[in-house]
Amino acid sequence: MYIVVCCRNNLDSGGSMFLKVYSITILLLDLLSLIVKVIFAILESIFQTFTGGAEKSVVNEIVLVTGTGHGIGKELAHQYASLGAIVVCWDINQEQNDETVQELRKIGCKAYGYKCDVADRDSVLALALKVKEEVGDVTILVNNAGIMPCHPLLQHNHQEIRKIFDINVLAHFWMLEAFLPSMIQNNRGHVVALSSMAGVMGLRNLVPYCASKYAVRGLMDALNEELREDARQIEVKFTSIFPFIVDTGLCKKPYTRFPFLLNFVPAKKAAKAIITAQRRNYSEVSIPGILLHLNSVLRLLPLKAAQHLKDFIDSGVDSDTT
């Protein structure tokens, strides 16, 4: 009996040792695979930084842009159309939006215009069905529409704060609800969301706006991860854009100490950078491009050191109520 028990203990001990060796071997192989993947990703990123990477065609893609009545949205509509895309223009201002559509049609581009309040979920969903019937499945969605009141937090009333979040945040959810399912079903598509550098770092006179743009960044990051980990291997791409100050009239009183470093970007130049980022499948891009890298450096510094550097750069917006 003693011999049998000893043999059984030896077998159990041997089996346990085998499992430990097996587990350690698998862990080491996983670590080796991780190191190779990380090195490859770094080299790929460096290569893309210097070469830019190939730009995919948008010919005959159905591109829906919100806020096409003026500014960045209008420029996006023109530039996508010039690249051969079918452009669907949405704006709450029908007169300005119709003007954009007519400009595109005059130069022989395919363009469709619709009046829509993107903050109104029912309107978004109903109009999305109309677009599907009249144009087809949207393959590139650019959530551009937004508002930017600039004054101290306690000078905002609750209606204004709610409006900021309705347009700058909740509209993204309604647009995704309307157009993401067909992209997933077709296993192709691209969603571009305009956040802001105010969605990366806090700025005075922009507290509700900053909060809304942080929300857009979180939405895009989480959604990207959700689909990346989906077992269906969904080929829908996501790009977040972080402009500093674009010259569209949205920001009334911008200022900067170093215009050669942080100059106000023309809408045409911003639109070109956005389209390039989308066509190269970049996950995030700042305008100017150096700003995300600068923010990464700031995040490595102690808070007070980062604040001193921000004070030295001295860029932002003054209140539009003074």
Image (tube, grey):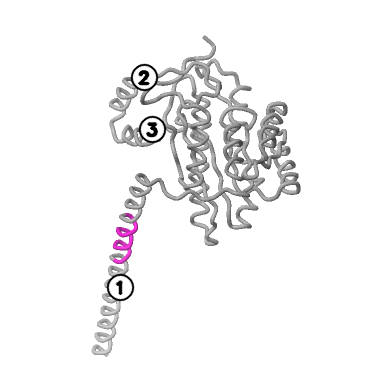
Quick check: is 205 in the magenta stretch? no
Residue type beneath disc 2: Asp
Q: Which residue is mark 3?
A: 291
Q: Label 3 crowding class (10 Å Cα cut-off): few <14, some 14-19, many 20+?
A: some
Front one among 268 and 300: 268
Q: Residue 314's mark?
A: 2
Question: Element under label 3?
Answer: helix
Front one among 119 and 291: 291
Against 161, is 23 above or below?
below
Q: Residue 32's mark?
A: none
Select label 1 or label 3 by which is in front. Answer: 3
The boundaries of the magenta stretch are 29-38
Select label 2 or label 1 by which is in front. Answer: 2
Tell me the distance, in whole angstroms, between the alpha carbons under discs 1 and 3. Answer: 46 Å
Question: Sequence-wise, which precedes: disc 1 or disc 3?
Answer: 1
Q: Label 2 crowding class (10 Å Cα cut-off): few <14, some 14-19, many 20+?
A: few
